[in-house]
Image (cartoon, rainbow, N blue to C red):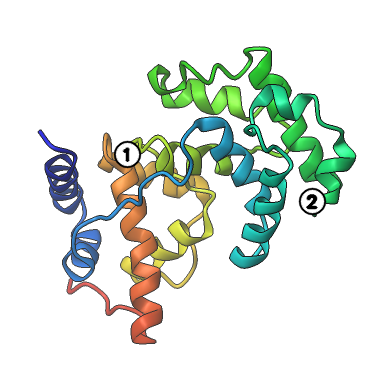
Amino acid sequence: MSPRTGLAAATAEVARADPAIARIIERAGPIQLPKPRQPDPFLALAEAIVYQQLAGRAAAAIWGRVVSQFPDGMTPEAVVATEEAALRGAGLSLRKAQSIKDLAARAADGTIPLDRLRRMTDEEIARRLTVVKGVGQWTAEMFLIFELRRLDVWPVLDFGVRKGWAIAHDLADLPAPKSLDAEGERFRPYRTVAAWYCWRAVSLARASEMVLPALPS
């Protein structure tokens, strides 16, 4: 089965599980998970730290300056050997410089086994990643979705997922993470697909400048 066929089958299962999400699927079309931005997990995680709470252009500029500090390659060992001041000089905040240094140290000592990540479970990966300073559950979940392309991730802390769920189901208020977590059970093992269509619901609503109408009772 090709990845495209697999995603199509997963989307069909999600549509069968929830008529409201099925309507979003019909409007949005096939799921399109982007290709991973970085060639290896360490670079992907370091970039994710840089991009936290920054606009795209500003983050991209800082990331470019950070990478330029390592002409022979930005490896965990190279980052460990680099002074924190050099990372600060590239435009990182103190917190982010410390986070990237901590990430590098934990990758170098094997706490985060970069060569085995793709064979580990989602839960184990998240547990390992969230010991890093500045890497929380949300960052771990985005890594699982967009870098490892795991199909059963349900990021209930993400504002876009909560907002999209409210739009799709014509809710006046955003669902609480705990209640949304329970709602996601119906989509296993394809919760990533449901999350992606929640994000698309937000985009569609913005494009049309209107909230999607309620489902007929």
Q: Is residue 176 left or right of residue 207?
A: right
> What quarter of the picture does the C terminus occupy?
bottom left
Question: How far from the left and from the top, in percent, is residue 157?
Answer: 54, 49
- Direction from residue 64 to residue 10 in the image, left or right: left
Furthest-top residue in this view? 109
Left or right, 184 with reference to 111: left
Q: Quadrant of residue 48?
A: top right
**111 above or below 142?**
above
Q: Residues within 10 Å of mark 1 (few under 14, many from 20)?
A: few
Quadrant hosting residue 76: top right
Quadrant housing the N terminus: top left
Q: Residue at x 45, y 73 (%)?
A: 172
Check disc 1 and give the amino acid type.
Answer: Glu
For label 2, count other residues whose C-alpha is less than 10 Å away and answer few (under 14), some (14-19) or many (20+).
some
Q: Residue furthest front?
A: 71
Provide the secondary structure element on which disc 2 rests.
Answer: loop
Amino acid at the residue labelled 2: Ala
